[in-house]
Image (tube, grey):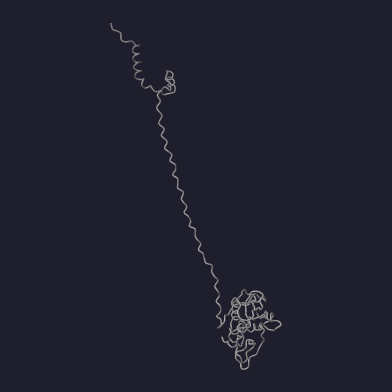
């Protein structure tokens, strides 16, 4: 009698065991949310499962402050020192060539006479051996005359030993105010007015008593026919003749036989047989 083989139940059990062995490793990781829930139900919770350590957070790199851009040091602007320009000094206008022995005293431009005179500032020491007499120097405003030059010429003539101081009659002293005698240079028209009641007809000069000596500017500039081109001698005559009147001297004529004309002769009108002369001291009147 045949021994019976293994029954069907045994075969099924063997197949089940083998299948479990073969399939088990392939089902260790849930592939869906349902499977994960089933595993949890068997006692495995999510927190009990090993967790992979977190990836290390890279250490923060140290923040490097931005390199500061150096502020450029401003280049100092050089301060320019201004160049001092010297103040130009007025250049004196060249004077016209004077006639021999005199200073011209002319100033460029025409006359614009105003009829008003101005006293020139200036005082001086007394000179002479006689009684003291003061004088001032005045010029009509508007005349083209170098005022300082004119004043210097008047002083030079009056201080000369060949003039009235050399006779011992007077000591002159120039002053600014309250003079005993005013020496005035004026235009022909103003001269005519200042010389009244004398008639100077625009040509002559005059002295009014002892207080006012009026010199006609035309005569001062151009002399008179008896003097030719000797302006220096005429100016000496003009000043000394009129100042002689202020000192009390009257007109005289040319002496018989000629010679140097007396300074109190009216030489502007002519000298006759005499020789034109500008000094009171006729004995040393040369030059």
Assign the N terminus to one quadrant of the image: top left
Residue extending farthest bottom: 257
Residue extending farthest left: 1
Q: How many marks?
A: 0
Q: Nearer the viewer, residue 170 or 242?
A: 170
- Where residue 32 appears, as percent x and y from the top left, is 43, 23
- 83 lies left or right of 245: left
- Where residue 152 appears, as percent x and y from the top left, is 59, 78
Quarter of the figure with residue 161 = bottom right
Quarter of the figure with residue 8 = top left
Q: Nearer the viewer, residue 26 or 157?
A: 157
Residue extending farthest top: 1
Q: Nearer the viewer, residue 114 or 196?
A: 196
- Where residue 273 appears, as percent x and y from the top left, is 61, 92
Quarter of the figure with residue 263 = bottom right
Assign the C terminus to one quadrant of the image: bottom right
- Where residue 86 appears, as percent x and y from the top left, is 52, 67
Q: Nearer the viewer, residue 122 or 117?
A: 122
């Amino acid at each position: 009698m045949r021994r019976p083989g293994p029954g069907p139940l045994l075969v099924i059990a063997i197949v089940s065991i083998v299948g479990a062995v073969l399939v088990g490793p392939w089902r260790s990781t849930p592939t869906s949310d349902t499977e994960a829930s089933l595993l949890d139900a068997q006692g495995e919770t999510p927190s009990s499962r090993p967790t992979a350590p977190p990836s290390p957070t890279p250490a923060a790199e140290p923040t490097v402050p931005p390199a500061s851009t150096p502020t450029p040091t401003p280049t100092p602007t050089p301060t320019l020192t201004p160049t001092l320009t010297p103040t130009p000094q007025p250049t004196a206008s060249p004077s016209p060539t004077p006639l021999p022995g005199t200073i011209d005293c002319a100033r460029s431009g025409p006359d614009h006479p105003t009829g008003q005179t101005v006293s020139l500032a200036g005082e001086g020491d007394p000179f002479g051996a006689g009684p003291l007499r003061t004088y001032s120097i005045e010029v009509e405003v508007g005349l083209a005359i170098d005022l300082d030059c004119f004043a210097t010429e008047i002083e030079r003539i009056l201080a000369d030993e060949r003039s009235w101081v050399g006779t011992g009659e007077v000591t002159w002293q120039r002053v600014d105010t309250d003079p005993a005698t005013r020496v005035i240079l004026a235009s022909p028209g103003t001269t005519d007015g200042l010389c009244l009641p004398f008639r100077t007809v625009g040509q002559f000069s005059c002295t009014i008593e002892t207080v006012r000596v009026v010199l006609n500017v035309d005569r001062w500039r151009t002399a008179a026919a008896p003097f030719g081109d000797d302006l220096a001698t005429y100016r000496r005559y003009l000043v000394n003749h009129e100042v002689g009147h202020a000192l009390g001297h009257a007109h005289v004529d040319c002496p018989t036989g000629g010679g140097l004309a007396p300074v109190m002769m009216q030489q502007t009108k002519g000298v006759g047989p005499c020789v034109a002369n500008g000094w009171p001291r006729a004995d040393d009147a040369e030059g």
